[in-house]
Amino acid sequence: MSDQEKVDKTRRSLVVATSAVGAAAGVGVAIPFAASMLPSEKAKAAGAPVEIDLSKLVPGELGIFEWRGKPVWVMKRTKEMLDGIKQADARLTDPASKVDQQPAYAKNEFRSAKPDLMVLVGVCTPLGCSPKPKAAEDKAEMGADWTGGFYCPCHGSKFDLAGRVYKGSPAPKNLEVPPYAYSSDSTLVIGEDKETKGA
Ligand code: FES
């Protein structure tokens, strides 16, 4: 199967709204990004918190946003995706998120302030590549017990849909969870801490 066919297959379930940063980091999906999903140039330059309108995200789709020059992934996880996360524990390096890679409010089963909403920095821990989304249906490529997540082609690290790294991966740590808060039910603010601003 060619690389392009693999990408097309992934897009069945995980559609990526990529940003300029996502593209620069090697996210190989050619869907046009939604300008409304990107922070203003001023906000980017200042490293300011980035506001995201969650009403534009369809469950199961991955949105990529730029915060402080890094790609931040945001996804509304479906019930099937959350069930898949629960099944992965025995195959993970740090299933309980003991290593300090997340704020205190994300040190839980789904590594998130609210169970359904995934918020991760999309940068792999060894060399900074950006992993690719791989749907639960990609079992032929990822293994029979794959329940969906991300694959880093640089050295072959695998992560689940909470950003937890699989045993045997070169990446030593789970993906980072950035600080974030909800300013309303449908507005997420990356870079503002829930503990200081309230959720
Ligand atoms: S940078 Fe991701 S596996 Fe090496």
Image (cartoon, rainbow, N blue to C red):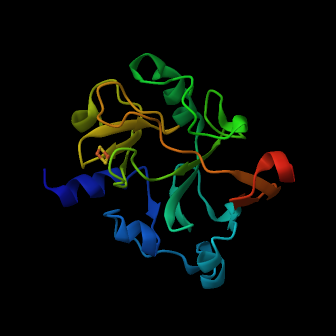
> Residue shown at 47%/33% (left/top)?
164
Q: Is 14 placed left or right of 75 in the picture?
A: left
**Vertical arrangement, residue 1 with respect to residue 66, above or below:** above
Query: Looking at the picture, how far across and down is residue 86, in whole percent?
Result: 54, 23
Residue 38 versus residue 125 in the image, above or below: below
* Residue farthest to the left, as pictured: 1
Q: Is residue 59 left or right of residue 48?
A: left
Q: Residue at x 70, y 53 (%)?
A: 180
Task: Locate residue 64, reporting x and y percent.
Answer: 51, 62
Q: Is residue 198 above or below residue 168?
A: below
Q: Report the residue that reaches farthest toward the bottom.
A: 41
User: Does any portion of residue 199 appear in the rendered image?
Assistant: no
Observer able to see residue 159: yes
Where is residue 76 shown, x and y percent of the image? Answer: 61, 48
Extreme residue toward the top, this view: 90
Q: How many marks?
A: 0
Location of residue 155 in the rendering, given as x and y in whole percent from the top left corner:
23, 43
Residue sitting nearer the eye, 77 or 151: 151
> Residue drawn at (66%, 77%), measured in percent from left and top?
43
Looking at the image, residue 178 sits to the left or right of residue 64; the answer is: right
Q: Quadrant of residue 146?
A: top left
